[in-house]
Every structure is written in structure tokens, then in C-alpha cells.
Amino acid sequence: MSDTLLARLTEVVGATHVLTELGGHPDLADYRGVYQGRALAIVHPGSTAEVASVMRLSHAARTPVVVQGGNTGLLGGATPDESGRAVVLKLHRLNRVRAIDPSNDTITVEAGCVLQHVQEQAAAADRLFPLALGAQGSCTIGGNLATNAGGIQVLRYGNMRELTLGLEVVTAQGEVWHGLRGLRKDNTGYDLRDAFIGSEGTLGVITAATLKLFPKPVGCLTALLRVASPEDAVSLLGLLRQRWGGALTAFELFSGSVLGFVRARLPDKPLPVPDLDEASWYALVDYADFSGDPVQQTLFEKPLADALESGLLTDATIAQNEGQRQKWWHLREHGVMEAQATLGRNVKHDISLPISRIPSFLVQSQARLQQRFPALFIIAYGHLGDGNLHYNLVRPESLPLAEFIGWEDEIHELVHDLVHEFGGSISAEHGVGQGKRDALLRYKDPVELALMGRLKQAFDPEGILNPGKVLPASVWPGA
Ligand code: FAD
Ligand code: MLT
Ligand code: ZN
């Protein structure tokens, strides 16, 4: 049976695009090396029509299909299971920009386009595509849609869902839904677009999307701001929202102790934060300048000067040039992750909370963790403007990695229970994948879960799309 399927897949996409010698292939493991799987084949289709044929053949053969974009997901959503039955459908050849309509402020791109390429194409048309995240040089629009990615500009422009107008999707059975509408208003019934966004390859294969574009700022003013506490960081966020309005495009928070950790773990890379105070908290903020008028500098600086005077800010450094700005953003988007990786695997949380409750969450979670796991170090940073924290635990070097990983489930439960008590979510922007699948049973409304199971039944009754991801087995028997 599998030989017949492989022969047919080869007819459809060509022999060079069906890989079957897969020993140690990097696409069978996730980005962090936490999940590892096996596959019947990795298939590289070159068009929507080829994706549809692959789906029809796989559906007829009852063969699971795991869609993969850039494989930068952080919860094992794109990694097949260990059965070796699945076809991995890798979409990097679907990489065309189909259209840009500057008057409608839209761009239509194929799912395998790398995010950074889409940003560049928008910029070439004097527009902004605002999704921005650390993996933008390799993640794809399809993966961004399937995980409803967030990143650093959500507080101004929204997450991937809010940036999307239309989709083209291949169903589990191999039909093509032509939904590439560039409409900002369309109330003609149920919104299927929103069902596919965030579905992590379990409901359909996204092959193209029509996305929103925005006016491109002519410049960006950036500051690194120091505050005494998370409470003050929340007050600062409120102040900048009020005084900068829509010009505030990013508000990222780190604890000073995280920056001290980066400095200690990456000694060859000078930390671009002079006079670091590890007991303080730091905010990295961007102000978008749409006019280039010198008055913008004043509008940017005046609230910071006022906050220094009132004591809300204890220090403020304004980027003097693009190089300094890039160093801070590199620290935020890469340095913090790299420093954690020097200790091997960490225990990650991607949580969201009402912004007002973040300070007390930080106090209570630290108290609970210190009581149960006093040796662990807390790495707290994230997108404060969205109420989204990356709240990770790293081990001391003296603690064996295996022992630390043995605590992982208990650590997750401790943190997620508290998030739940605070009215938050256990996944803000990274999705569910296989890593958080079973935790949904503990935290998600049972009716909501049952409806998700019925949606899966309606879209993919044979359960061939990404089995074992998102839906717990008791909700969807095919899991
Ligand atoms: P993959 O990892 O290949 O796939 C992810 C999921 O989507 C899988 O379930 C897969 O089956 C499904 N999928 C992929 N393509 C399709 C498709 N065409 N149709 C249907 N399903 C599909 N995320 C954030 O939200 N914000 C961040 O700031 C952020 N920063 C990151 C920084 C780094 C350094 C890294 C490594 C990751 C980061 N992420 C962040 C994680 C984020 O999910 C991914 O970067 C990105 O959105 C996934 O895209 P991908 O193409 O790599 O998808
Ligand atoms: C980020 O914000 O940098 C990403 O979501 C990745 C992470 O740190 O977990
Ligand atoms: Zn993030």
C-alpha cells in the first residue's frame, strides 16, 4: 500500500521532490530538539494543485499528513509521530508573491513564503507588513497562520489572525477552497478563515493568503527604559499608550536578572546595557515616525522626560543610531534565547494574563516555584503590551539535565495552574502542538473542547491531518 502511494506521489510532484531516505533528516525533529519522529516520506509540492493531489492520494490511502513550513514552531506541531506512517508535506516551494494591491493595502502570497521575504516585498511597495518575530528569516506565512503567530508588534497591529483577510486552503479530502478575498467586510455566514487560522495543520492545508498592509513608517525611535518593578512597567505602558497613541509599536519587558543571566552565559558578547541593575526591570520600546517631522523627536522624548521626573523611570537611554537599536533588538530576539540554550533544554511557558494582573502573578509564581524548586532560575520576559510573558525555568549548571527535565511536568502544572487562577491562557502565541495537547483537558472549558472535536470531525472525519496534535485523545479519538 505505501509503495503504491509513494509511486503515485512521485507521479504528482516528481521523483526529486519525494524524499524517502530519511535517516537523521532535520525535518523529523523540532527546532529545539525536544520532539523526534519518523515518516514514510517528505514531499515537496510546487503548487496548490499538487498539494490537492497529494491530499487526495493520502486521503484515499488513509495516510496521515503533517504539514510543515519553516519548522520553527516551539511545541512539536510540525513533527510527525514515531509510527513512520505519515507523509510530511513541506511547503517551501509554494513561495510566490501572487499580487500586491497598494490601493487596497493587501498582499497575496503563497504559504511557503518566508515571513521576512513578505516584509521585504511589502517594503518595496512602500508598505508595511507588520508581523515581526525572531524566527522571521525562516518561518513561513503558512506556519504563521497555522499557529496564529504574534511577535513584537501585536499591541499596535494585532496577531496573524487580525492581519489576514483571505485564505486559500486544501481540505483533508483534496478540494481547494478559493477564499482569497481582499475584503475588510464580509458577513456572508460562518467565518471559515478563522477556523483555519490557529488550527496547526489539523483542519486543512493553507496554501495562500491575502494579508493586510499598512503605511510604512519613515523612521523608528527606540528607547531602553529602566523601571523599579513590574507595577511600574505596567504604569509606563499605560503612559506611553496614552501619550504616544498609535506610534507605540512595541513594548517588550525583561527582568534585570534575565539580562544579568545573558551577560554571564554569553561572556564573549558584550551586553549592550551599560550600568545594568539586576534588581530592576527593563522595557524596550519602539515609536514609529510616519512624518519625519522634527517634532516627532519631541513627542517621543517628552513623556520619557516626564516619567524620569516623576520617578516612574529610573533611567532612559535613547538609541543614537540604527546600530544601537539593532543591538538591543538582537539581545531581545536572539540573545535571551541563545543564553538559555547554553544550559541545554529549558522549561518554557508562553502565557498570557490580563496586563493588570502580571505584577502579582510574578510575585506569586516566584514564591510557589522557590518553595518547591529553590535551585531553579526564572527567566521572565516578553510582550508586556499584549499581556504575554515568556516565563521559563533554567537549571543551575550543577543540576543534571535529566533530573531537571524529570521535573518538567510538575513545573508546568505549577505555573499553568496559577495562570489559570489568574484568568490567563497557557498558550499566548506558540499554539498547542503536541506539547500542550493534554494540558487543554485541565484548563479549557469542556464544552469548548467538545465543539473543537466536532469541528475536527466535520473537516477531517478520517483524521488524517496532523494526528496527535492540538486535540486530546478523549476529545478526538483519532489523536
Ligand atoms: P512550522 O514550525 O513548520 O509549523 C508550525 C505548525 O503549523 C505545525 O502544526 C504545522 O503542521 C502547521 N503548519 C505549517 N504550515 C502550515 C500550512 N501551510 N497549513 C496548515 N498548517 C501548517 N512565535 C510567535 O508567535 N511569536 C514570536 O515572537 C516567536 N518568536 C520565535 C523566535 C524563535 C527564535 C523561534 C524559533 C520561534 C518563534 N516563534 C514565535 C514560534 C512560531 O510559531 C514560529 O516561528 C512560526 O509562526 C511558525 O512558522 P513555521 O513556518 O516555522 O511553522
Ligand atoms: C519570543 O518572543 O522571543 C518568542 O516567542 C520565542 C520565545 O522566547 O519563546
Ligand atoms: Zn514571543
Image: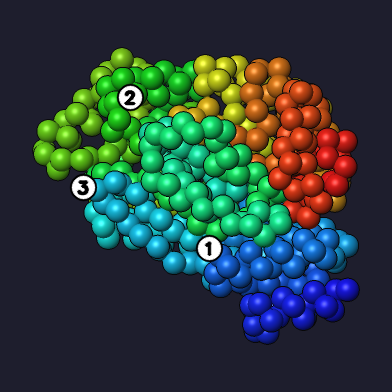
Frontmost residue, 272 versus 319:
319
Which quadrant, please, contains the N terminus?
bottom right
**Which residue is found at the position 60% from the left and 35% from the top?**
428
Please name the residue that numbered disc 2 is placed on: 240
Q: Position of residue 221 (x, y in %)?
A: 26, 41
Q: Is residue 254 visible?
A: no
- Which of pointers 3 and 2 indicates the residue nearer the eye? 3
Determine crowd level at label 3: few under 14, some 14-19, many 20+ residues with C-alpha closer than 10 A.
Answer: few
Q: Read off the residue under disc 3.
A: 218
As drawn, which residue projects farthest toward the bottom?
15
Look at the picture and state if 19 lies above or below 298.
Answer: below
Left or right: residue 187 versus residue 430 is left
- Compared with 184, 44 (above or below) is below
SS at circle 2: helix
Q: Which mark is residue 112?
A: 1
Could you give the CA–CA distance between mark 3 and mark 2, rounded to whole angstroms? 20 Å
